[in-house]
Amino acid sequence: MGYGPHPAVHGLSGAVDHGDLLAIVGPNGSGKSTLLKGIVGSLTPMAGACEHVDGCRLAYLPQQADIDTTFPATVFDLVKLGLWPTRGLLGRITRTDRQAIGRALEAVGLGGFEKRTIDTLSGGQLQRALFARVLLQDADLILLDEPFNAIDTKTVDDLIGVIQRWHSEKRSVIAVMHDLDLVRDHFPNALLLSREPIAWGPTAEVLQAENLLKARRFNAAWDEDAPWCADHKHSHGQAA
Ligand SMILES: Nc1ncnc2c1ncn2[C@@H]1O[C@H](COP(=O)(O)OP(=O)(O)OP(=O)(O)O)[C@@H](O)[C@H]1O
């Protein structure tokens, strides 16, 4: 996957198991967001393919920088968007829907915030509201891009709780993460990326010092004009 003629992620082959809780880690610019966009389908692979099992419902939380908070919407409007896969954008909101939105906001600690406009929220409150939207989506596969960027410890703890709930419900969760301690503590599996996969598997094995060093070296040595890599160096599980 890449942009224009430049590959940003290549040589990656593997499958994410149903119910997996997977962290994608790697240096800045190593292709983590690009990979998520490829899985979501907003970026078409330049070669190869990314496939989901039939009927897989997907929810995607992009980096906060991708969200326009100047849009004049309330927290209720923002969270309500989580219903669009089932209701459509113009669908009428029922009383049950309102209750579901209220419950989702309670679950992320934002009970009573329905009427607040999103431009008045702090970064952590906005992230909580976005998690509430994902809760409503009732997705099988949840993709989170740096969900804890610039978020305080209390909010991180609460939102990790939401992720654990999804995991216990056997939903698959893939999150781009920078805090390796959080990954070690809460994610059973990790994929270490540096434009190509360095390691993919149980977190303790993937995050060994040797792999982390390799990822840093790989990324630093990257040449923007390098050609595509012909061989697939790493494969994980069965190709999906
Ligand atoms: N829209 C784009 N057009 C051109 N190049 C892009 C675009 N988006 C990303 N890139 C390039 O693709 C490479 C991978 O970027 P990506 O955002 O996937 O990295 P990342 O691992 O998520 O980084 P970070 O940790 O900094 O968020 C980088 O070299 C980046 O400059």
Image: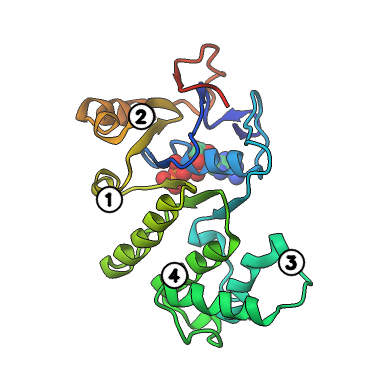
State if disc 3 and disc 1 touch (CB < 8 Å): no
Q: Residue furthest top?
A: 231
Q: Secondary structure at mark 2?
A: strand
- Residue labelled with disc 2: 201
- Residue labelled with disc 3: 87
State if disc 1 and disc 4 touch (CB < 8 Å): no
* Coordinates of residue 7 in the picture (x, y in percent): 57, 28
* Coordinates of residue 204 in the picture (x, y in percent): 24, 34
Q: Secondary structure at mark 3?
A: helix
Task: Residue type at mark 4: give it.
Answer: Arg
- Residue labelled with disc 4: 128
Q: Secondary structure at mark 1?
A: helix
Label 4 Cα neighbours within 10 Å, binned few <14 / some 14-19 / many ≥20 = many
Q: Secondary structure at mark 4?
A: helix
In primary-sequence order, the first of circles 4 and 2 is 4
In primary-sequence order, the first of circles 3 and 4 is 3
Instruction: Tell us which disc is closer to us: 2 or 3.
Output: 3
Label 2 Cα neighbours within 10 Å, binned few <14 / some 14-19 / many ≥20 = some
Q: CA distance from mark 1 to mark 2?
A: 16 Å
Q: CA distance from mark 2 to mark 3?
A: 38 Å
* Coordinates of residue 2 in the picture (x, y in percent): 59, 33
Colouring method of the image: rainbow
Q: Residue furthest right?
A: 90
Task: Residue type at mark 1: give it.
Answer: Leu
Give the numbered dot on residue 130. none
